[in-house]
Amino acid sequence: MIIPPDPIREAAAYQRYLLDALGEDDPADAQATTATTMRELIDAAGSDLRTRPAEGEWSVLECLGHILDAEVVYSGRYRWTIAHEAPELIGYDQDLWVARLGHVDDDPEALFAHFSAMRIANLALWRGSSVDDRRRVGIHRERGPESYDLSFRLIGGHDRIHLAQARAALAAVGDLRSAG
């Protein structure tokens, strides 16, 4: 497993890590496929949806819950950045959110519905935004200036990384079942 750069202490490397996962792909196109992939993972996981592959690692459902958390956070960031002059964008501790928000116990259908609705709204916001909107900048408390355009591209890469993590968790759980 590749250990990602620390998003606070290695902010530029973390951004590059997410952007590299997106590559040259259109961020809206990449994000438009996430709900379908999420649905496939929920269906494929079956009874293994909540099973963690190892101590300290997230289950498939926790990975998907984290993608929802990021959508919630970035939904606000997009709107603050477009509407306000250089707003402060607070960070969050992803592990704390996954644990304290109880994603391992989430109803997968409710999680999927919430994510899908938010993603549709955020894609519509993007598609309706102007070039000037996309250039607007918020000041991330830990990483400094981030434009709406950069934030939107970061989420495209973020989705890919955590969907891959969910696939890997599912494969690892399957391997454990086969070995046991």
Image (spheres, rainbow, N blue to C red):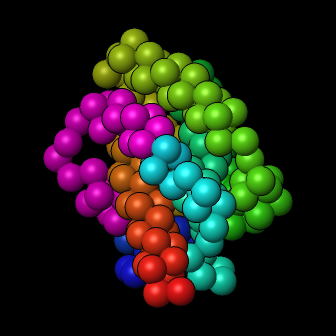
Query: From the viewer's perspective, is residue 50 above or below residue 146?
Result: below
Could you tell me which residue is drawn at 40 percent across and 12 percent down?
128
The residue lying toward the viewer, choosing from 137 and 164, is 164
The residue lying toward the viewer, choosing from 94 and 109, is 109
User: Where is residue 102 shown, x and y percent of the image?
Assistant: 79, 56
User: Where is residue 60 shown, x and y percent of the image?
Assistant: 55, 59
Numbered disc total: 0
Residue 89 shows in the view: no
Tell me the magenta residue range.
16-40
Position of 171 with respect to 16 (left or right) is right
In which quadrant is the N terminus drawn? bottom left
Query: Given the current orientation, which residue lies at the most extreme left position?
Result: 24
Query: Given the current orientation, which residue lies at the most extreme right position?
Result: 100
Residue 128 shows in the view: yes
Query: Given the current orientation, which residue lies at the most extreme bottom position?
Result: 179
To which quarter of the image does residue 56 belong? bottom right
Query: From the viewer's perspective, is residue 163 above or below residue 148?
Result: below
To which quarter of the image does residue 136 belong? top left
Could you tell me which residue is drawn at 45 percent across and 35 percent down?
35
Position of 45 with respect to 152 (left or right) is right
Q: Magenta stretch mostly in which secondary structure?
A: helix
Is residue 6 on the magenta stretch? no
Is residue 17 on the magenta stretch? yes
Could you tell me which residue is drawn at 33 percent across and 63 percent down?
16
Query: From the viewer's perspective, is residue 113 above or below residue 70?
Result: above
Could you tell me which residue is drawn at 72 percent across and 41 percent down?
107
User: Where is residue 133 shown, x and y percent of the image?
Assistant: 42, 23
Position of 56 with respect to 1 (left or right) is right
